[in-house]
Image (cartoon, rainbow, N blue to C red):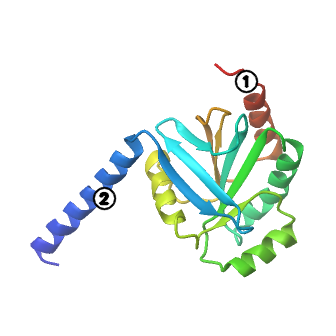
Amino acid sequence: MNIKKIVITILSLLMLGASYANAAASEIQKFTFKSLNNQKIVLNANIEGIKLKNSKNKVVLLDFFGNMCPPCLDEIPELIALQKKFKKNLQIIAFQVQTRTNNVDLKKFKKEEGINYPIINLTDPNVDNFLKYIIYRTNWKSIIPYAIIFDKQGKAQKIYIGERSLQEFENDIQILINKKDI
């Protein structure tokens, strides 16, 4: 590779990084997705965290998983139990990020597993930009399972890297549900 190509590549990467820095610093960035059930999901991101549109007073758990990842599969029953237990106060949204699985197969997977929360597939055209945003904001290294929990005001409260127990999730969610609004 000649020097000119190296310089152009470096400048391109710097400009890309600057564009994400500017986007992250902007007041609100809106991400719109379609779940496997064609539910429209809108996430409004800002410097403090992410707010799920139309989920006032709910704790939000974003789960980044793979449908062929053993630790991710181990967590699914726990997430199902959490969504069931805290249905009025919690919204889990899962992003399948491991493979470019078609929606038909992923819907079959969701049904077989009994998943009771929305799943957004990696094939959704808006997921790539959202993942870049998450990587930029949290320094995520694409390790799955990976989850971020947000309080009722949409402020990021905790990041989970790797598999977590039902008890840890439940304790953290309960604390956020009980937390008084400031």
Q: How many marks?
A: 2
In the displayed structure, would residue 179 be above or below residue 18?
A: above
Name the residue at 43% across, 50% down.
136
Tell me residue 176's x, y (percent). 72, 30
Q: Camera-side residue: 34 or 98?
A: 34
In the displayed structure image, the side of residue 105 where residue 130 appears, left or right: left
- From the viewer's perspective, is residue 1 above or below residue 42? below
Q: Secondary structure at mark 2?
A: helix
Is 131 placed left or right of 4 in the picture?
A: right
Q: Is residue 95 above or below residue 61?
A: below
Name the quadrant containing residue 7: bottom left
Circle 2 crowding by C-alpha within 10 Å: few under 14, some 14–19, many from 20: few
- Residue 165 percent coordinates (x, y): 79, 47
User: Residue 16 shows which numbered tag?
Assistant: 2
Q: Is residue 27 above or below residue 165?
A: above
Which residue shows up at 64% across the image and 56% down it?
41
Which quarter shows the C terminus?
top right
Say the numbered circle drawn on residue 62.
none
Q: Which element is circle 1 on?
A: loop
Sequence-wise first label, 2 or 1: 2
How far across and how far down the image is residue 146, in percent?
A: 63, 53
* Residue 155 position within the rendered picture, expressed as x and y whole percent measured from the top left: 58, 34
Give the residue at mark 1.
179
Q: Amino acid at mark 2?
A: Leu
**Quarter of the image where the N terminus is located:** bottom left
Q: Look at 25% across and 56% down and name the residue there.
A: 14
Q: Are marks 2 and 1 in contact (CB under 8 Å)?
A: no
Disc 1 residue type (three-letter): Lys
- Residue at 88 percent across and 48 percent down: it is 84
Q: Is residue 61 left or right of residue 75?
A: left
Cα–Cα gap, marks 2 and 1: 38 Å
